[in-house]
Image (tube, grey):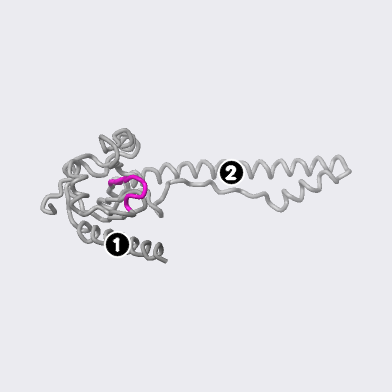
């Protein structure tokens, strides 16, 4: 019973601390001091490492996705999310690629066999007359060729649409912001959610908080 009470108390404090961070930060404007990758993967900051910023991952995401926020850009803090091992510090929308965002993948339409094609495949083996079987085989070949031509067209069309969608997504990425992911050691956030000042101290090298300080 005591353990349950402690768990409920910790959960309540956790929710209160997250709420306090959200009230303090969300909707406020800050200025970024580095280019931010155009993806929801954002920039990883590790409280247990020195240096804390994952520069290798950062460089990889910049190369792969491009830049959504540039050094010196002013942007709104649009979300603070406290999770089990990290805090998401979302800027200008938090970055493209969250649940619901288009991936750009286009699947070609499958062209099914017609009933006539299925029936011919079944009846040819049972047909005893050689000439009739040959005519049936020619008809079947024609139906297969027609279906395969349609499948090739559908695949080519899907590739064209995918190129268009990828181009559109690349443009959307540039408008969707980015984020910092602040990572903590296992179990830390269950005991202590950082205060707004502590969060600002962690990110002050890469974010100018201006009057928020």
In the figure, is residue 32 to the left or right of 60?
A: left
The structure residue drawn at horizontal position 27% and vertical position 38%, both measured from the top left corner, is 53
Residue 33 in the image, given as x and y percentages of width and height: 18, 41
Nearer to us in this view, 173 or 89: 89
Residue under numbered circle 1: 13
The numbered mark at residue 194 is: none
Q: Please report the residue visible at 59 percent of the width from the left and 44 percent of the height from the top.
A: 150
- Describe the element under mark 1 as helix, strand or loop: helix
Q: Residue furthest front?
A: 2
In terms of depth relative to the viewer, which is nearer, 174 or 21?
21
Q: Which numbered marker is on residue 151?
A: 2
User: Would residue 181 be counted in the magenta stretch?
Assistant: yes
Give, as a single range, the part of the protein colored magenta. 180-189
Q: Secondary structure at mark 2?
A: helix
When asked about the image quadrant of residue 164, the answer is: top left
In the image, taking residue 123 as reference, residue 203 lies left or right, namely left
Q: Where is residue 10 shown, x and y percent of the image?
A: 33, 60
Where's residue 209, x and y in %?
15, 49
Q: Does 91 appear in magenta?
A: no
Q: CA distance from mark 2 to mark 1?
A: 58 Å
Is residue 139 or residue 168 the one in the foreground?
168
Give residue 152's quadrant in the image. Answer: top right
Residue extending farthest right = 128
Instruction: Name which residue lies at 33% across and 38% down.
Output: 61
């Amino acid at each position: 019973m005591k353990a349950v009470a402690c768990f409920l108390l910790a959960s309540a404090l956790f929710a209160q601390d997250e709420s306090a961070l959200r009230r303090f930060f969300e909707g406020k404007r800050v200025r970024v001091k580095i280019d931010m990758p155009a993806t929801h993967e954002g920039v990883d900051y590790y409280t247990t490492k020195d240096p804390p910023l994952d520069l290798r991952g950062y460089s990889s995401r910049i190369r792969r996705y491009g830049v959504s926020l540039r050094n010196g850009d002013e942007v709104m803090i649009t979300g603070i999310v406290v999770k089990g091992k990290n805090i998401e510090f979302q800027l200008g929308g938090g970055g493209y690629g969250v649940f619901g965002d288009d991936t750009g993948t286009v699947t070609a339409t499958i062209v099914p066999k017609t009933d006539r094609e299925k029936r011919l495949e079944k009846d040819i083996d049972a047909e005893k007359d050689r000439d009739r079987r040959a005519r049936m085989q020619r008809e079947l070949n024609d139906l297969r060729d027609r279906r395969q031509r349609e499948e090739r067209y559908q695949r080519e069309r899907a590739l064209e649409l995918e190129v268009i969608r990828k181009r559109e997504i690349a443009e959307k990425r540039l408008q969707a912001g980015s984020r910092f992911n602040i990572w903590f050691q296992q179990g830390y956030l269950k005991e202590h959610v950082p205060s707004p000042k502590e969060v600002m101290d962690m990110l002050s090298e890469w974010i100018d908080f201006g009057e928020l300080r």
